[in-house]
């Protein structure tokens, strides 16, 4: 499996445009994920763009149950590691999410243009 591709966004309009471009380029909806520290923002963004959340089917039941007891940052890092990021990269990306940014992740693709 190739490592996930990602881009960090500061605004939702640019994020939506990138997701539309990915779909036009043939990236499957099942391979597009959005992550944010703000649960409401993440839900709204996923609803507006039809992007996926990283849920039980991606992380497995064990991780999902553990995430109930973890802090938001720990949950985000564990979700990122479950879809293919190493722990250092997951920590680095989670720090960006701490700043209010949104992360767009594409899995199962060798080459992606955002």
Image (cartoon, grey):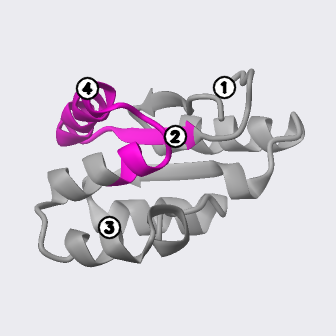
Q: Which residue is mark 2?
A: 104
Q: Which corner quadrant of the image does residue 79 belong to?
A: bottom left
Residue 61: image tag = none
Secondary structure at numbered mark 4: helix
Distance from the alpha carbon under mark 1 to that under mark 2: 9 Å
Whole-percent x, y for residue 12 in the image:
49, 44
Q: Residue at x 22, y 33 (%)?
A: 91
Where is residue 15 drawn, in percent x and y? 56, 40
Q: CA distance from mark 2 to mark 4?
A: 18 Å
Closer to the eye: label 3 or 1: 3
- Residue 100, compared with residue 36, is above or below; it is above
Say which residue label 4 marks: 88
Residue bearing mark 3: 63
Q: Are marks 3 and 1 in contact (CB under 8 Å)?
A: no
Instruction: Report which residue position mark 1 lands on.
Output: 114
Q: Residue at x 13, y 65 (%)?
A: 70
Bounds of the magenta segment: 79-105
The quadrant of the rendering that contains the N terminus is top right
Q: How many numbered marks are there?
A: 4
């Amino acid at each position: 499996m190739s490592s996930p591709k990602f881009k960090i966004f500061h605004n939702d309009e640019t994020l939506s445009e990138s997701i539309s471009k990915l779909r036009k380029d043939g990236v499957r909806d099942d391979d597009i994920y959005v992550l944010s520290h703000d649960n409401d923002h993440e839900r709204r963004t996923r609803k507006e763009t039809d992007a996926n959340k990283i849920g039980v089917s991606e992380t497995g039941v064990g991780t999902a149950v553990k995430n109930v007891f973890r802090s938001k940052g720990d949950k985000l890092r564990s979700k990122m590691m479950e879809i293919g990021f190493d722990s250092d990269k997951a920590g680095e990306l989670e720090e960006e999410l701490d700043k209010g940014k949104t992360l767009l992740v594409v899995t199962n693709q060798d080459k992606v243009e955002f």
